[in-house]
Amino acid sequence: MFARVFLVVTMLAGTWLASAETIQLKDQAAVSGKILAEKRDQVIVDLGFTVLSIPKSYIAKISKEGADPKASAPAKNGRSPANARASSPTPTPTVTAEVPAAPTVAAPRALYQGARAGLEEQSVRELVKQLGEAVVQVRAPSGLGSGFILNEEGYLITNFHVIEGETQLSVEVYHVRGGQLDRRSYKQIRIVAMNKFQDLALLKIEDKDAPKFASVPLGDSDVLAVGERVFAIGSPLGLERTVTEGIVSTKTRQLMGELYLQTTAQINPGNSGGPLFNLRGEVVGVTNMKLAFGEGLGFAIPVDAVRYFLRHRDAYVYDNDNPSNPYRYLEPPSRLKLSTASDEEAR
């Protein structure tokens, strides 16, 4: 929350104040300055002595102040305002601005729920009823996968390879209404961040009529024990809301330079991006692959890697309009060959 720090700045009348705007914050504080830009999630304000970025979630309202009437009114003795200022100095106005303190560590935690102490183990049957609503199906033109919702605002995790090269995404959510499942498809999906090398992507549902979503907590893969029972929920081969159960075979299976959880819970194409739960109802991994020539050999990204990705998501931010975006999608080789052949024929 914003801490109130008062800074007094001296400025000339009739210049900065003439275009000043007041931003009323939700904690009864206020900031006065010139708005330089309004972005999707923040407002950039020039305070004169510094430029401040204010998250829109902290803003109650924005109001414009009128120009200072004394700056343009003629002096009583008939002299122009400029001469009046030259002969009798006018006290310069002071601007009081309330500058927000640096964000606390609570901000990243608000994106997801952490492991909760004192949770007791339950049966898979009981946990599926509690957690199933937060497990979703992620669809792209090239295929589908699974995912799970982190908070009520609609942030969710899936695999990078589920959405790789795609921007037209949809998410199928199974809301529980009166004990019945209500399947809804959301089309306004924003790619927030993605890490190709750890096969993780953060998405957000932005449909205007979207309700508050059910979510699941993230556990701690460090305290996970080999032999501990786990279960997965996902859409293998498009069969939505499929539950598979198994144990943790090993916590440190090294594949392609990364460490994975190995599990006997059945993992198939379509499970990718879905959650692997422990019996306390916490996500301990993100299922992402299996060995094609064997059974009971599934793998999941440890949840500690997911936490790291979420805490440092600004480093993996996705923006199509950003020229510094590290991801460049090249044309498939077949299209390149066709275009090259067409060019040669034209010559």
Image (cartoon, rainbow, N blue to C red):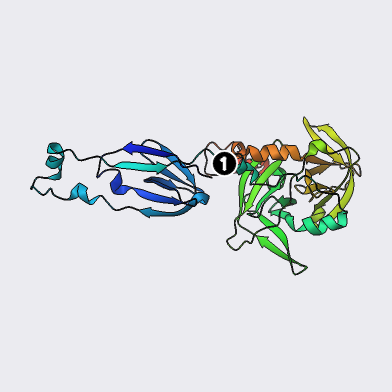
Quarter of image, res 213: bottom right
Q: Is residue 187 above or below residue 76?
A: below
User: In the image shown, does 99 or 33 lie closer to the viewer?
Assistant: 99
Residue 176, horizontal then vertical, whole percent: 74, 64
Q: Is residue 104 left or right of residue 170?
A: left
Q: Is residue 80 left or right of residue 203?
A: left
Residue 221 in view of the camera: yes
| Residue at x 44% of width, y 44% of height | 44
Q: Quadrant of the C terminus?
A: top right
Q: Is residue 257 left or right of residue 204?
A: right
Q: Quadrant of the N terminus?
A: top right
Q: Is residue 102 above or below residue 139?
A: above
Residue pointed to by mark 1: 343
Q: Is residue 118 left or right of residue 29?
A: right
Q: Residue furthest left?
A: 78
Q: What is the crowding at mark 1: few (fewer than 14 residues within 10 Å), some, or many (at least 20)?
A: few
User: In the image shown, does 12 or 2 lie closer to the viewer?
Assistant: 2
Q: Residue furthest bottom?
A: 178
Q: How many marks?
A: 1
| Residue at x 40% of width, y 36% of height | 50
Residue 195 in view of the camera: no
Residue 116, horizontal then vertical, whole percent: 75, 46
**Identity of the amino acid at label 1?**
Asp
User: In the image shown, does 217 or 261 lie closer to the viewer?
Assistant: 217
Residue 25, horizontal then vertical, whole percent: 46, 50
